[in-house]
Image: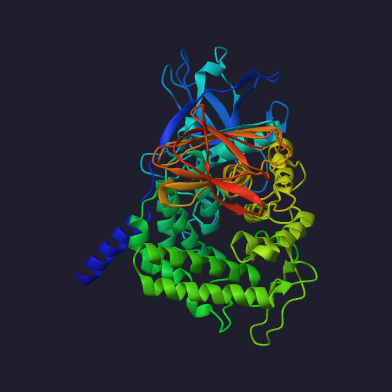
Amino acid sequence: MRAFVCLIAISCSLLQAQERSPVVPSKDAPVKAEKQADGRWFIDFGDAAFGNVEITSPDAKVGTKVSVHLGEALAGPGALNRKPGGTVRYQGAEVTLKARTPVSPEFSWKPPGWMKEGFLSLPKGAPEMMPFRYVEIEGAPASFSGDQIRRVSWSVPFDESASAFQSSSPELDAVWGLCKHSIKATSFLGLYVDGDRERKPYEADVLINQLGHYCLDARYDTARLTHEYLLEKPTWPTEWRLQSVILAWHDFLWSGDDRSLKKHYATLKGRAMIERRTPEGFFEGWNKGDITDIVDWPAGERDGYDMKPEVKTVVTAFHYQALVLLEKMATHLGKSSDAKEFAAMAEATRKAVNEKLWDESRGCYLDGLDPKSGNPSSHASAHASFFALALGLVPEERIARVGEFLKLKGMVCSVYGSQFLLEALYEAGQGDKALSLLTSNDLRSWRNMSEKVGSTITLEAWDPSLKPNLDWNHAWGSAPANIIPRGLMGIEPLEPGFKRFRVRPQTGGLEMAKLKLPTPKGPVLLELRGKEASQWSAKLTVPAGTAAEFHLPYPGEPEASLAGKAATPRVLREERGRKVIGLGPGSWEISVR
């Protein structure tokens, strides 16, 4: 009897851990359907999505069979690649048509070791599906046309109109569109997963997916449920376990809902792994074992990071950020003794890193140190500096130097690392450099993914040459979906639920940029024009129930109007020689004189 009760308890726990957002189907018409010279029909749906096709023939004869081929890649103009290699997807099947009745091919998806690896099963009510953009049909009846085929794709409910972005750069707009579609298309399992190659969640993927989803649609359930799933089933990289604290804080800060925070506070404290602190305040990680330091992935994207020391600057930076956020959580929950303890530990870590791992001659941070001898590594990767800056370890007086160091380094990291590199560049005021990386068409760029590789969903890595087994449907490559709103346009919540938010734009050389950002209080609308102080202006809609802290991008005095009438904005302070003004609800116009 006891064993039976235990079995029920385990089953209930697994069901709870796998609670998901609902997924819903959409029917997509092809953007192109052409009969080729050899009799094949070639069909293009314009972008890739997870689903299947339905073919409805008005007059199919009994027993008519057609061959249907679906895939992500082209072999050439008007030709699907049926042997794409790696984990780029293709499947073919024979289908028997029925007059006036939709029919679909049957797919299988059984990756090696899928049961022991914990890959997610399909959501309730959803059929087996695959990612594809292109379809070929062989043996179609003479009456066949593109009107007879539809793609049925699956995703969480997604309001396409909730967000929008437009700028004077067509290249930047295309990158935004690529990443926005990626967030929607890869939600097909109701939790964020590691693409189609590994249908399971990982914390690092969730972090980038979470922020992108928040910036595109005011829905917070998918991120929350995936985060809670990972609290029960953490993955192996050291830093990614530490990221659970960041995921929890983002959930509260953006949504304003603290129920998950309250429920999981004890687990989140454990995720900081305080027992791994050295007496000085560094974090001693692992070079092998069930938990292992990762820094970046694939390994070739680490800018030569010295992985030998057990104390790594990158891992310590994530530990530091976890402590900072745990202090905020404890304060919110009324746990003052916890808050004081976390604050003291965070300060000790910040002091240790800046005393022992800063290289004054180069203006950057070293990769780590040996905890026994205290000897630092001689190597200084970009990662040691951009993670330190993005995660709050860099003192104000060093930020500019770190920014210059990173500016010269460029994109020397993975698609995952780019999230933190771009955050660091915007924190350092390097908006021009960040914009050049966002719009680049180099090997390590989003335009390479779409324009050269040919994917319409972000890739697992920048290019197949850098990771031969990459998949073409990985949302951890979609950093611009949140970096454009949070970095370039500069909008981020300062208080939970957007009760107060910051606007600190850094639009670089753009002549114009317009953003619609969803929040729990309603959309924030921001339009920026001009790339010189004399031409610069902004229009900002602050939703009811919120207040904005606007950082002027140029020195000078602010001029403003509210609902078309002249208004004197309240100057809150100066930062880096520029005014920061406070704005209440309404439609504002702002300039600098």
Position of the N terminus, as image quadrant, is bottom left
Residue occupying image coordinates x 54% and y 74%: 347
Q: Nearer the viewer, residue 255 or 65?
A: 255
Asked if 351 appears above or below 461 in the picture, the reply is below
Furthest residue to the bottom? 373
Asked if 537 appears above or below 287 in the picture, the reply is above
Protein image colouring:
rainbow
Residue 287 seen in the current view: no
Position of the C terminus, as image quadrant, is top right
The spot of residue 377 in percent (x, y) is 73, 76
Quarter where residue 485 is shown? top right
Asked if 463 appears above or below 62 in the picture, the reply is below
Quarter where residue 175 is shown? top right
Could you tell whether 513 is left or right of 162 in the image? right
Residue occupying image coordinates x 68% and y 46%: 555
Q: Nearer the viewer, residue 563 or 125?
A: 563
The spot of residue 343 in percent (x, y) is 48, 72
Q: Nearer the viewer, residue 457 or 408?
A: 408
The spot of residue 226 in percent (x, y) is 43, 53
Could you tell whether 222 is left or right of 178 in the image? left
Residue occupying image coordinates x 43% and y 23%: 102
The spot of residue 561 in percent (x, y) is 53, 32
Could you tell whether 444 is left or right of 282 in the image? right
